[in-house]
Image (cartoon, rainbow, N blue to C red):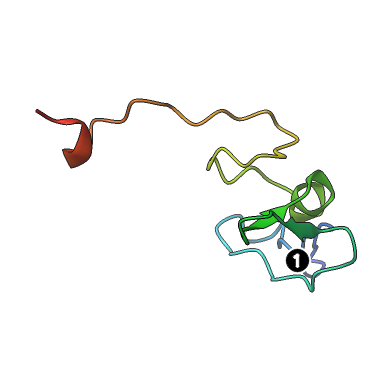
Amino acid sequence: MPLGNFYNASGRNFDSPMSAPVPQPLQPGDFYYTPEGYLVFTEQYHRRRGSCCQSGCRHCPWKFKAKSGRQGASNQK
């Protein structure tokens, strides 16, 4: 008999590994705006989120680097 639902700090349910993370409210220090007006999430935010999204984020604490030179339509001759 299951004991109940167990959640980690990011809101992810351990009993259901495929469940989506529960959105967390932003806290001071989670992001900043660049001079161009882009919102950039900080390492603090990513660590609280709890997992890498593999998007090559500027402040990724997991040091993921997105592959460069994708073979998209703009790269084809």
> Taking 27 as reference, is 71 left or right?
left
Residue with the most extreme front position: 35
| Residue sitting at x 64%, y 42% | 52
**Crowd tier of the residue under label 1, counting other residues whose Cα lies within 10 Å: few below 14, some 14–19, many 20 or above:** few
Please identify the quarter of the rendering in which residue 65 is found: top right
Q: Is residue 59 left or right of residue 38?
A: right
x, y percent for residue 14:
72, 56
Q: Is residue 56 left or right of residue 28?
A: left
**Residue at (58, 46) in percent of width and height:** 53
Q: Nearer the viewer, residue 10 or 28?
A: 28
Q: Which residue is mark 1?
A: 2
Name the residue furthest left.
77
x and y, in percent, of residue 67 in the image: 43, 27
Between 73 and 1, the one lying in front of the other is: 73
Residue type of the residue flagged with mark 1: Pro
Expressed as whole percent of the image width and height from the top left, the position of residue 25 reads: 79, 74
Q: Nearer the viewer, residue 57 or 49?
A: 57
Q: Vertically, is 74 above or below 24? A: above
Query: Looking at the image, which residue is at 68% across and 46% down?
Result: 51
Give the residue drawn at x 65%, y 64%.
Answer: 21
Single out the residue that lies furthest toward the right: 28
